[in-house]
Image: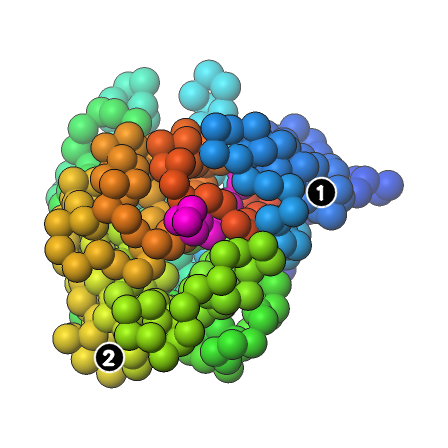
């Protein structure tokens, strides 16, 4: 077969925004893409507004977050922060479009989206040429014909790539396998290649079957946190402690790498900062075995590939992570091995976190929850409230469901909060709240 041509940087450069524009994105400016409604507003102004909105929303609930509890928000880079591209493939095999379906189901090409990290932007034209070379016909939603539905590309902080072709059937899997050497020549940092089979005609990004075409089945995402006890830099600040996370193909990962680092670093700083919250009730001295200064037993529910659990792992601490995705749990266990954490201290279990009862056995000193947008829900919130857990770190990508869950845990009072700009140019906000049981 014909080889795939390597990346050409000149054709990868996004078209410049029109003169006089403050926008970072020509696709936004010319109306091609509406995914980032605030793209034309300077990022510091966006962030101030997002912070004000989030503070107001959470001050208003039945278990309010006091205005004085908020730390300075963690600001993102304005562009080149997204480590994952989820591209709908449309057009034709000869001229594929990688992006979204616009009004009327017409394909819109977003391969020059300035949010993607440079490694993704350089890879997309190479992958478009591979689609042409392999004759992969994009799936036509209205005609229900074609084979290639989506292209999912993730870049690690080291620039390694995971590329997944979401196909309607297995028809082209052998062609993709045969193209691997040529793809590797064109994309030398290609670490993981797979075909995901998504046979149903529904708006679902990926299906349950993943066919791996490389030996590696996961991407190493090496994050960097500040040293223990040191305040984290915002967003892009690389610190000296490595947090190596393994991302398997069908697992969640925070899409903004710099902000993910800030989030895990803040959780770690707060977890060990039990005595220093302004206005917090004094706790027992550190030496008292029943009330240690830093938590000894930590649970991380909805742990994904283990970001919070592994950031919080320490010599005098037992950590349990629970996550519904078995693939993500495999990744978390592999990362724990890479970090040489003994499995009697750091344990990961696949299962439904929403049915757990922290009061059923020895109660964790610190519970981390980082649920999907729906929140932890009434039942888990009520069990946490009843279990007598002293401290909860609640990381939420949906302040509205967070406010509801806080109202269900009236004994756990928000003492500290921080906004993380995980999704710049949109209204979405990620919030971390430090809850302490009222005495
Ligand atoms: C917002 S992500 C957080 C992942 C992780 N904490 C991180 O920092 O990357 C939510 C996670 O919850 C998982 N999840 C969804 N429902 C679940 C459930 N009922 N029990 C356990 N995990 C669940 C998802 O698979 C996903 O990995």
Tell me which numbered mark, 1 or 2, is placed earlier along the sequence. Answer: 1
Q: For residue 191, say whether it is visible.
A: no
Q: Secondary structure at mark 1?
A: helix
> Does 139 appear above or below 219?
above
Q: Between residue 178 and residue 152, name the one nearer to us.
A: 152
Q: Is residue 315 visible?
A: yes
Instruction: Find numbered disc 2 in the image and state the secondary structure of the residue it sits on.
Output: loop
Image quadrant where residue 168 sits = top left
Q: Are marks 1 and 2 in contact (CB under 8 Å)?
A: no
Q: Residue at x 47, y 52 (%)?
A: 434
Q: Which residue corresponds to the image point at 65% horizontal and 47% vertical from the top-left?
A: 68
Q: Provide the residue designation for mark 1.
A: 48
User: Dividing the picture into quarters, in which one does residue 230 lie?
Assistant: bottom right
Given residues 206 and 347, the one toward you in this image is 347
Badge 2: residue crowd in 10 Å (few <14, some 14–19, many ≥20):
some
Dividing the picture into quadrants, the one containing residue 59 is top right
436 part of magenta stretch: yes
Q: Position of residue 15 (x, y in %)?
A: 68, 46
Task: Decide if ligand 1 comes within 8 Å of the CB at mark 2.
Answer: no
The residues colored magenta run 428-439
380 sits left or right of 240 in the view: left
In space, the residues marked 1 and 2 are separated at their CA atoms by: 40 Å
Q: Residue at x 56, y 28 (%)?
A: 60
Q: Where is residue 122 drawn, in percent x and y?
A: 51, 60
Q: How is the image coloured?
A: rainbow
Prevailing SS of the magenta stretch: strand
Q: Is residue 235 above or below residue 204?
A: below
State the residue position of label 2. Answer: 341
On whether ligand 1 comes within 8 Å of the CB at mark 1, the answer is no
For the N terminus, the quadrant is: bottom left
């Amino acid at each position: 077969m014909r080889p795939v041509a390597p990346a050409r940087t000149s054709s990868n450069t996004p078209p410049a925004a029109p003169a006089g524009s403050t926008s970072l994105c020509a696709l936004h400016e010319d109306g091609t893409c509406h995914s980032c409604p605030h793209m034309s507003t300077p990022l510091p102004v966006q962030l101030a507004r997002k912070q004000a909105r989030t503070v107001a929303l959470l001050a208003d609930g039945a278990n309010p977050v006091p205005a004085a509890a908020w730390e300075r928000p963690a600001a993102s880079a304005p562009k080149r922060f997204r480590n994952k591209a989820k591209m709908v493939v449309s057009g034709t095999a000869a001229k594929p479009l990688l992006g979204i379906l616009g009004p009327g189901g017409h394909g819109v090409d977003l391969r020059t989206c300035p949010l993607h990290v440079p490694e993704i932007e350089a890879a997309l034209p190479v992958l478009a040429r591979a689609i042409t070379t392999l004759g992969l016909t994009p799936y036509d939603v209205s005609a229900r014909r074609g084979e290639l539905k989506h292209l999912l590309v993730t870049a690690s902080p080291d620039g390694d790539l995971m590329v997944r072709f979401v196909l309607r059937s297995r028809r082209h899997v052998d062609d993709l396998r045969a193209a691997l050497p040529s793809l590797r020549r064109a994309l030398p940092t290609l670490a993981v290649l797979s075909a995901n089979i998504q046979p149903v005609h529904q708006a679902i990004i990926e299906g349950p079957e993943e066919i791996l075409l490389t030996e590696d089945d996961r991407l190493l995402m090496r994050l960097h946190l500040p040293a223990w006890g040191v305040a984290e830099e915002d967003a892009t600040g690389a610190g000296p402690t490595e947090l190596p996370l393994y991302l398997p193909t069908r697992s969640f990962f925070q899409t903004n790498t710099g902000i993910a680092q800030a989030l895990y670093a803040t959780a770690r700083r707060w977890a060990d900062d039990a005595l220093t919250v302004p206005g917090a009730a004094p706790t027992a001295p550190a030496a008292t075995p029943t009330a240690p200064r830093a938590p000894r037993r930590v649970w991380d529910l909805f742990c994904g590939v283990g970001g919070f659990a592994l950031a919080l792992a320490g010599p005098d601490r037992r950590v349990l992570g629970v996550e519904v995705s078995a693939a993500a749990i495999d990744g978390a266990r592999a990362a724990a091995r890479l970090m040489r954490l003994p499995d009697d201290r750091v344990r990961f279990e696949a299962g439904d976190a929403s049915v757990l009862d922290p009061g059923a056995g020895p109660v964790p000193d610190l519970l981390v929850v980082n649920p999907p947008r729906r929140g932890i829900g009434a039942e888990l919130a009520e069990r946490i409230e009843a279990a007598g857990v002293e401290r909860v770190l609640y990381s939420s990508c949906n302040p509205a469901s967070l406010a509801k869950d806080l109202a269900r845990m009236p004994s756990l009072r928000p003492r500290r909060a921080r906004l993380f700009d995980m999704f710049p140019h949109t209204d979405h906000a990620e919030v971390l709240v430090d809850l302490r049981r009222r005495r």
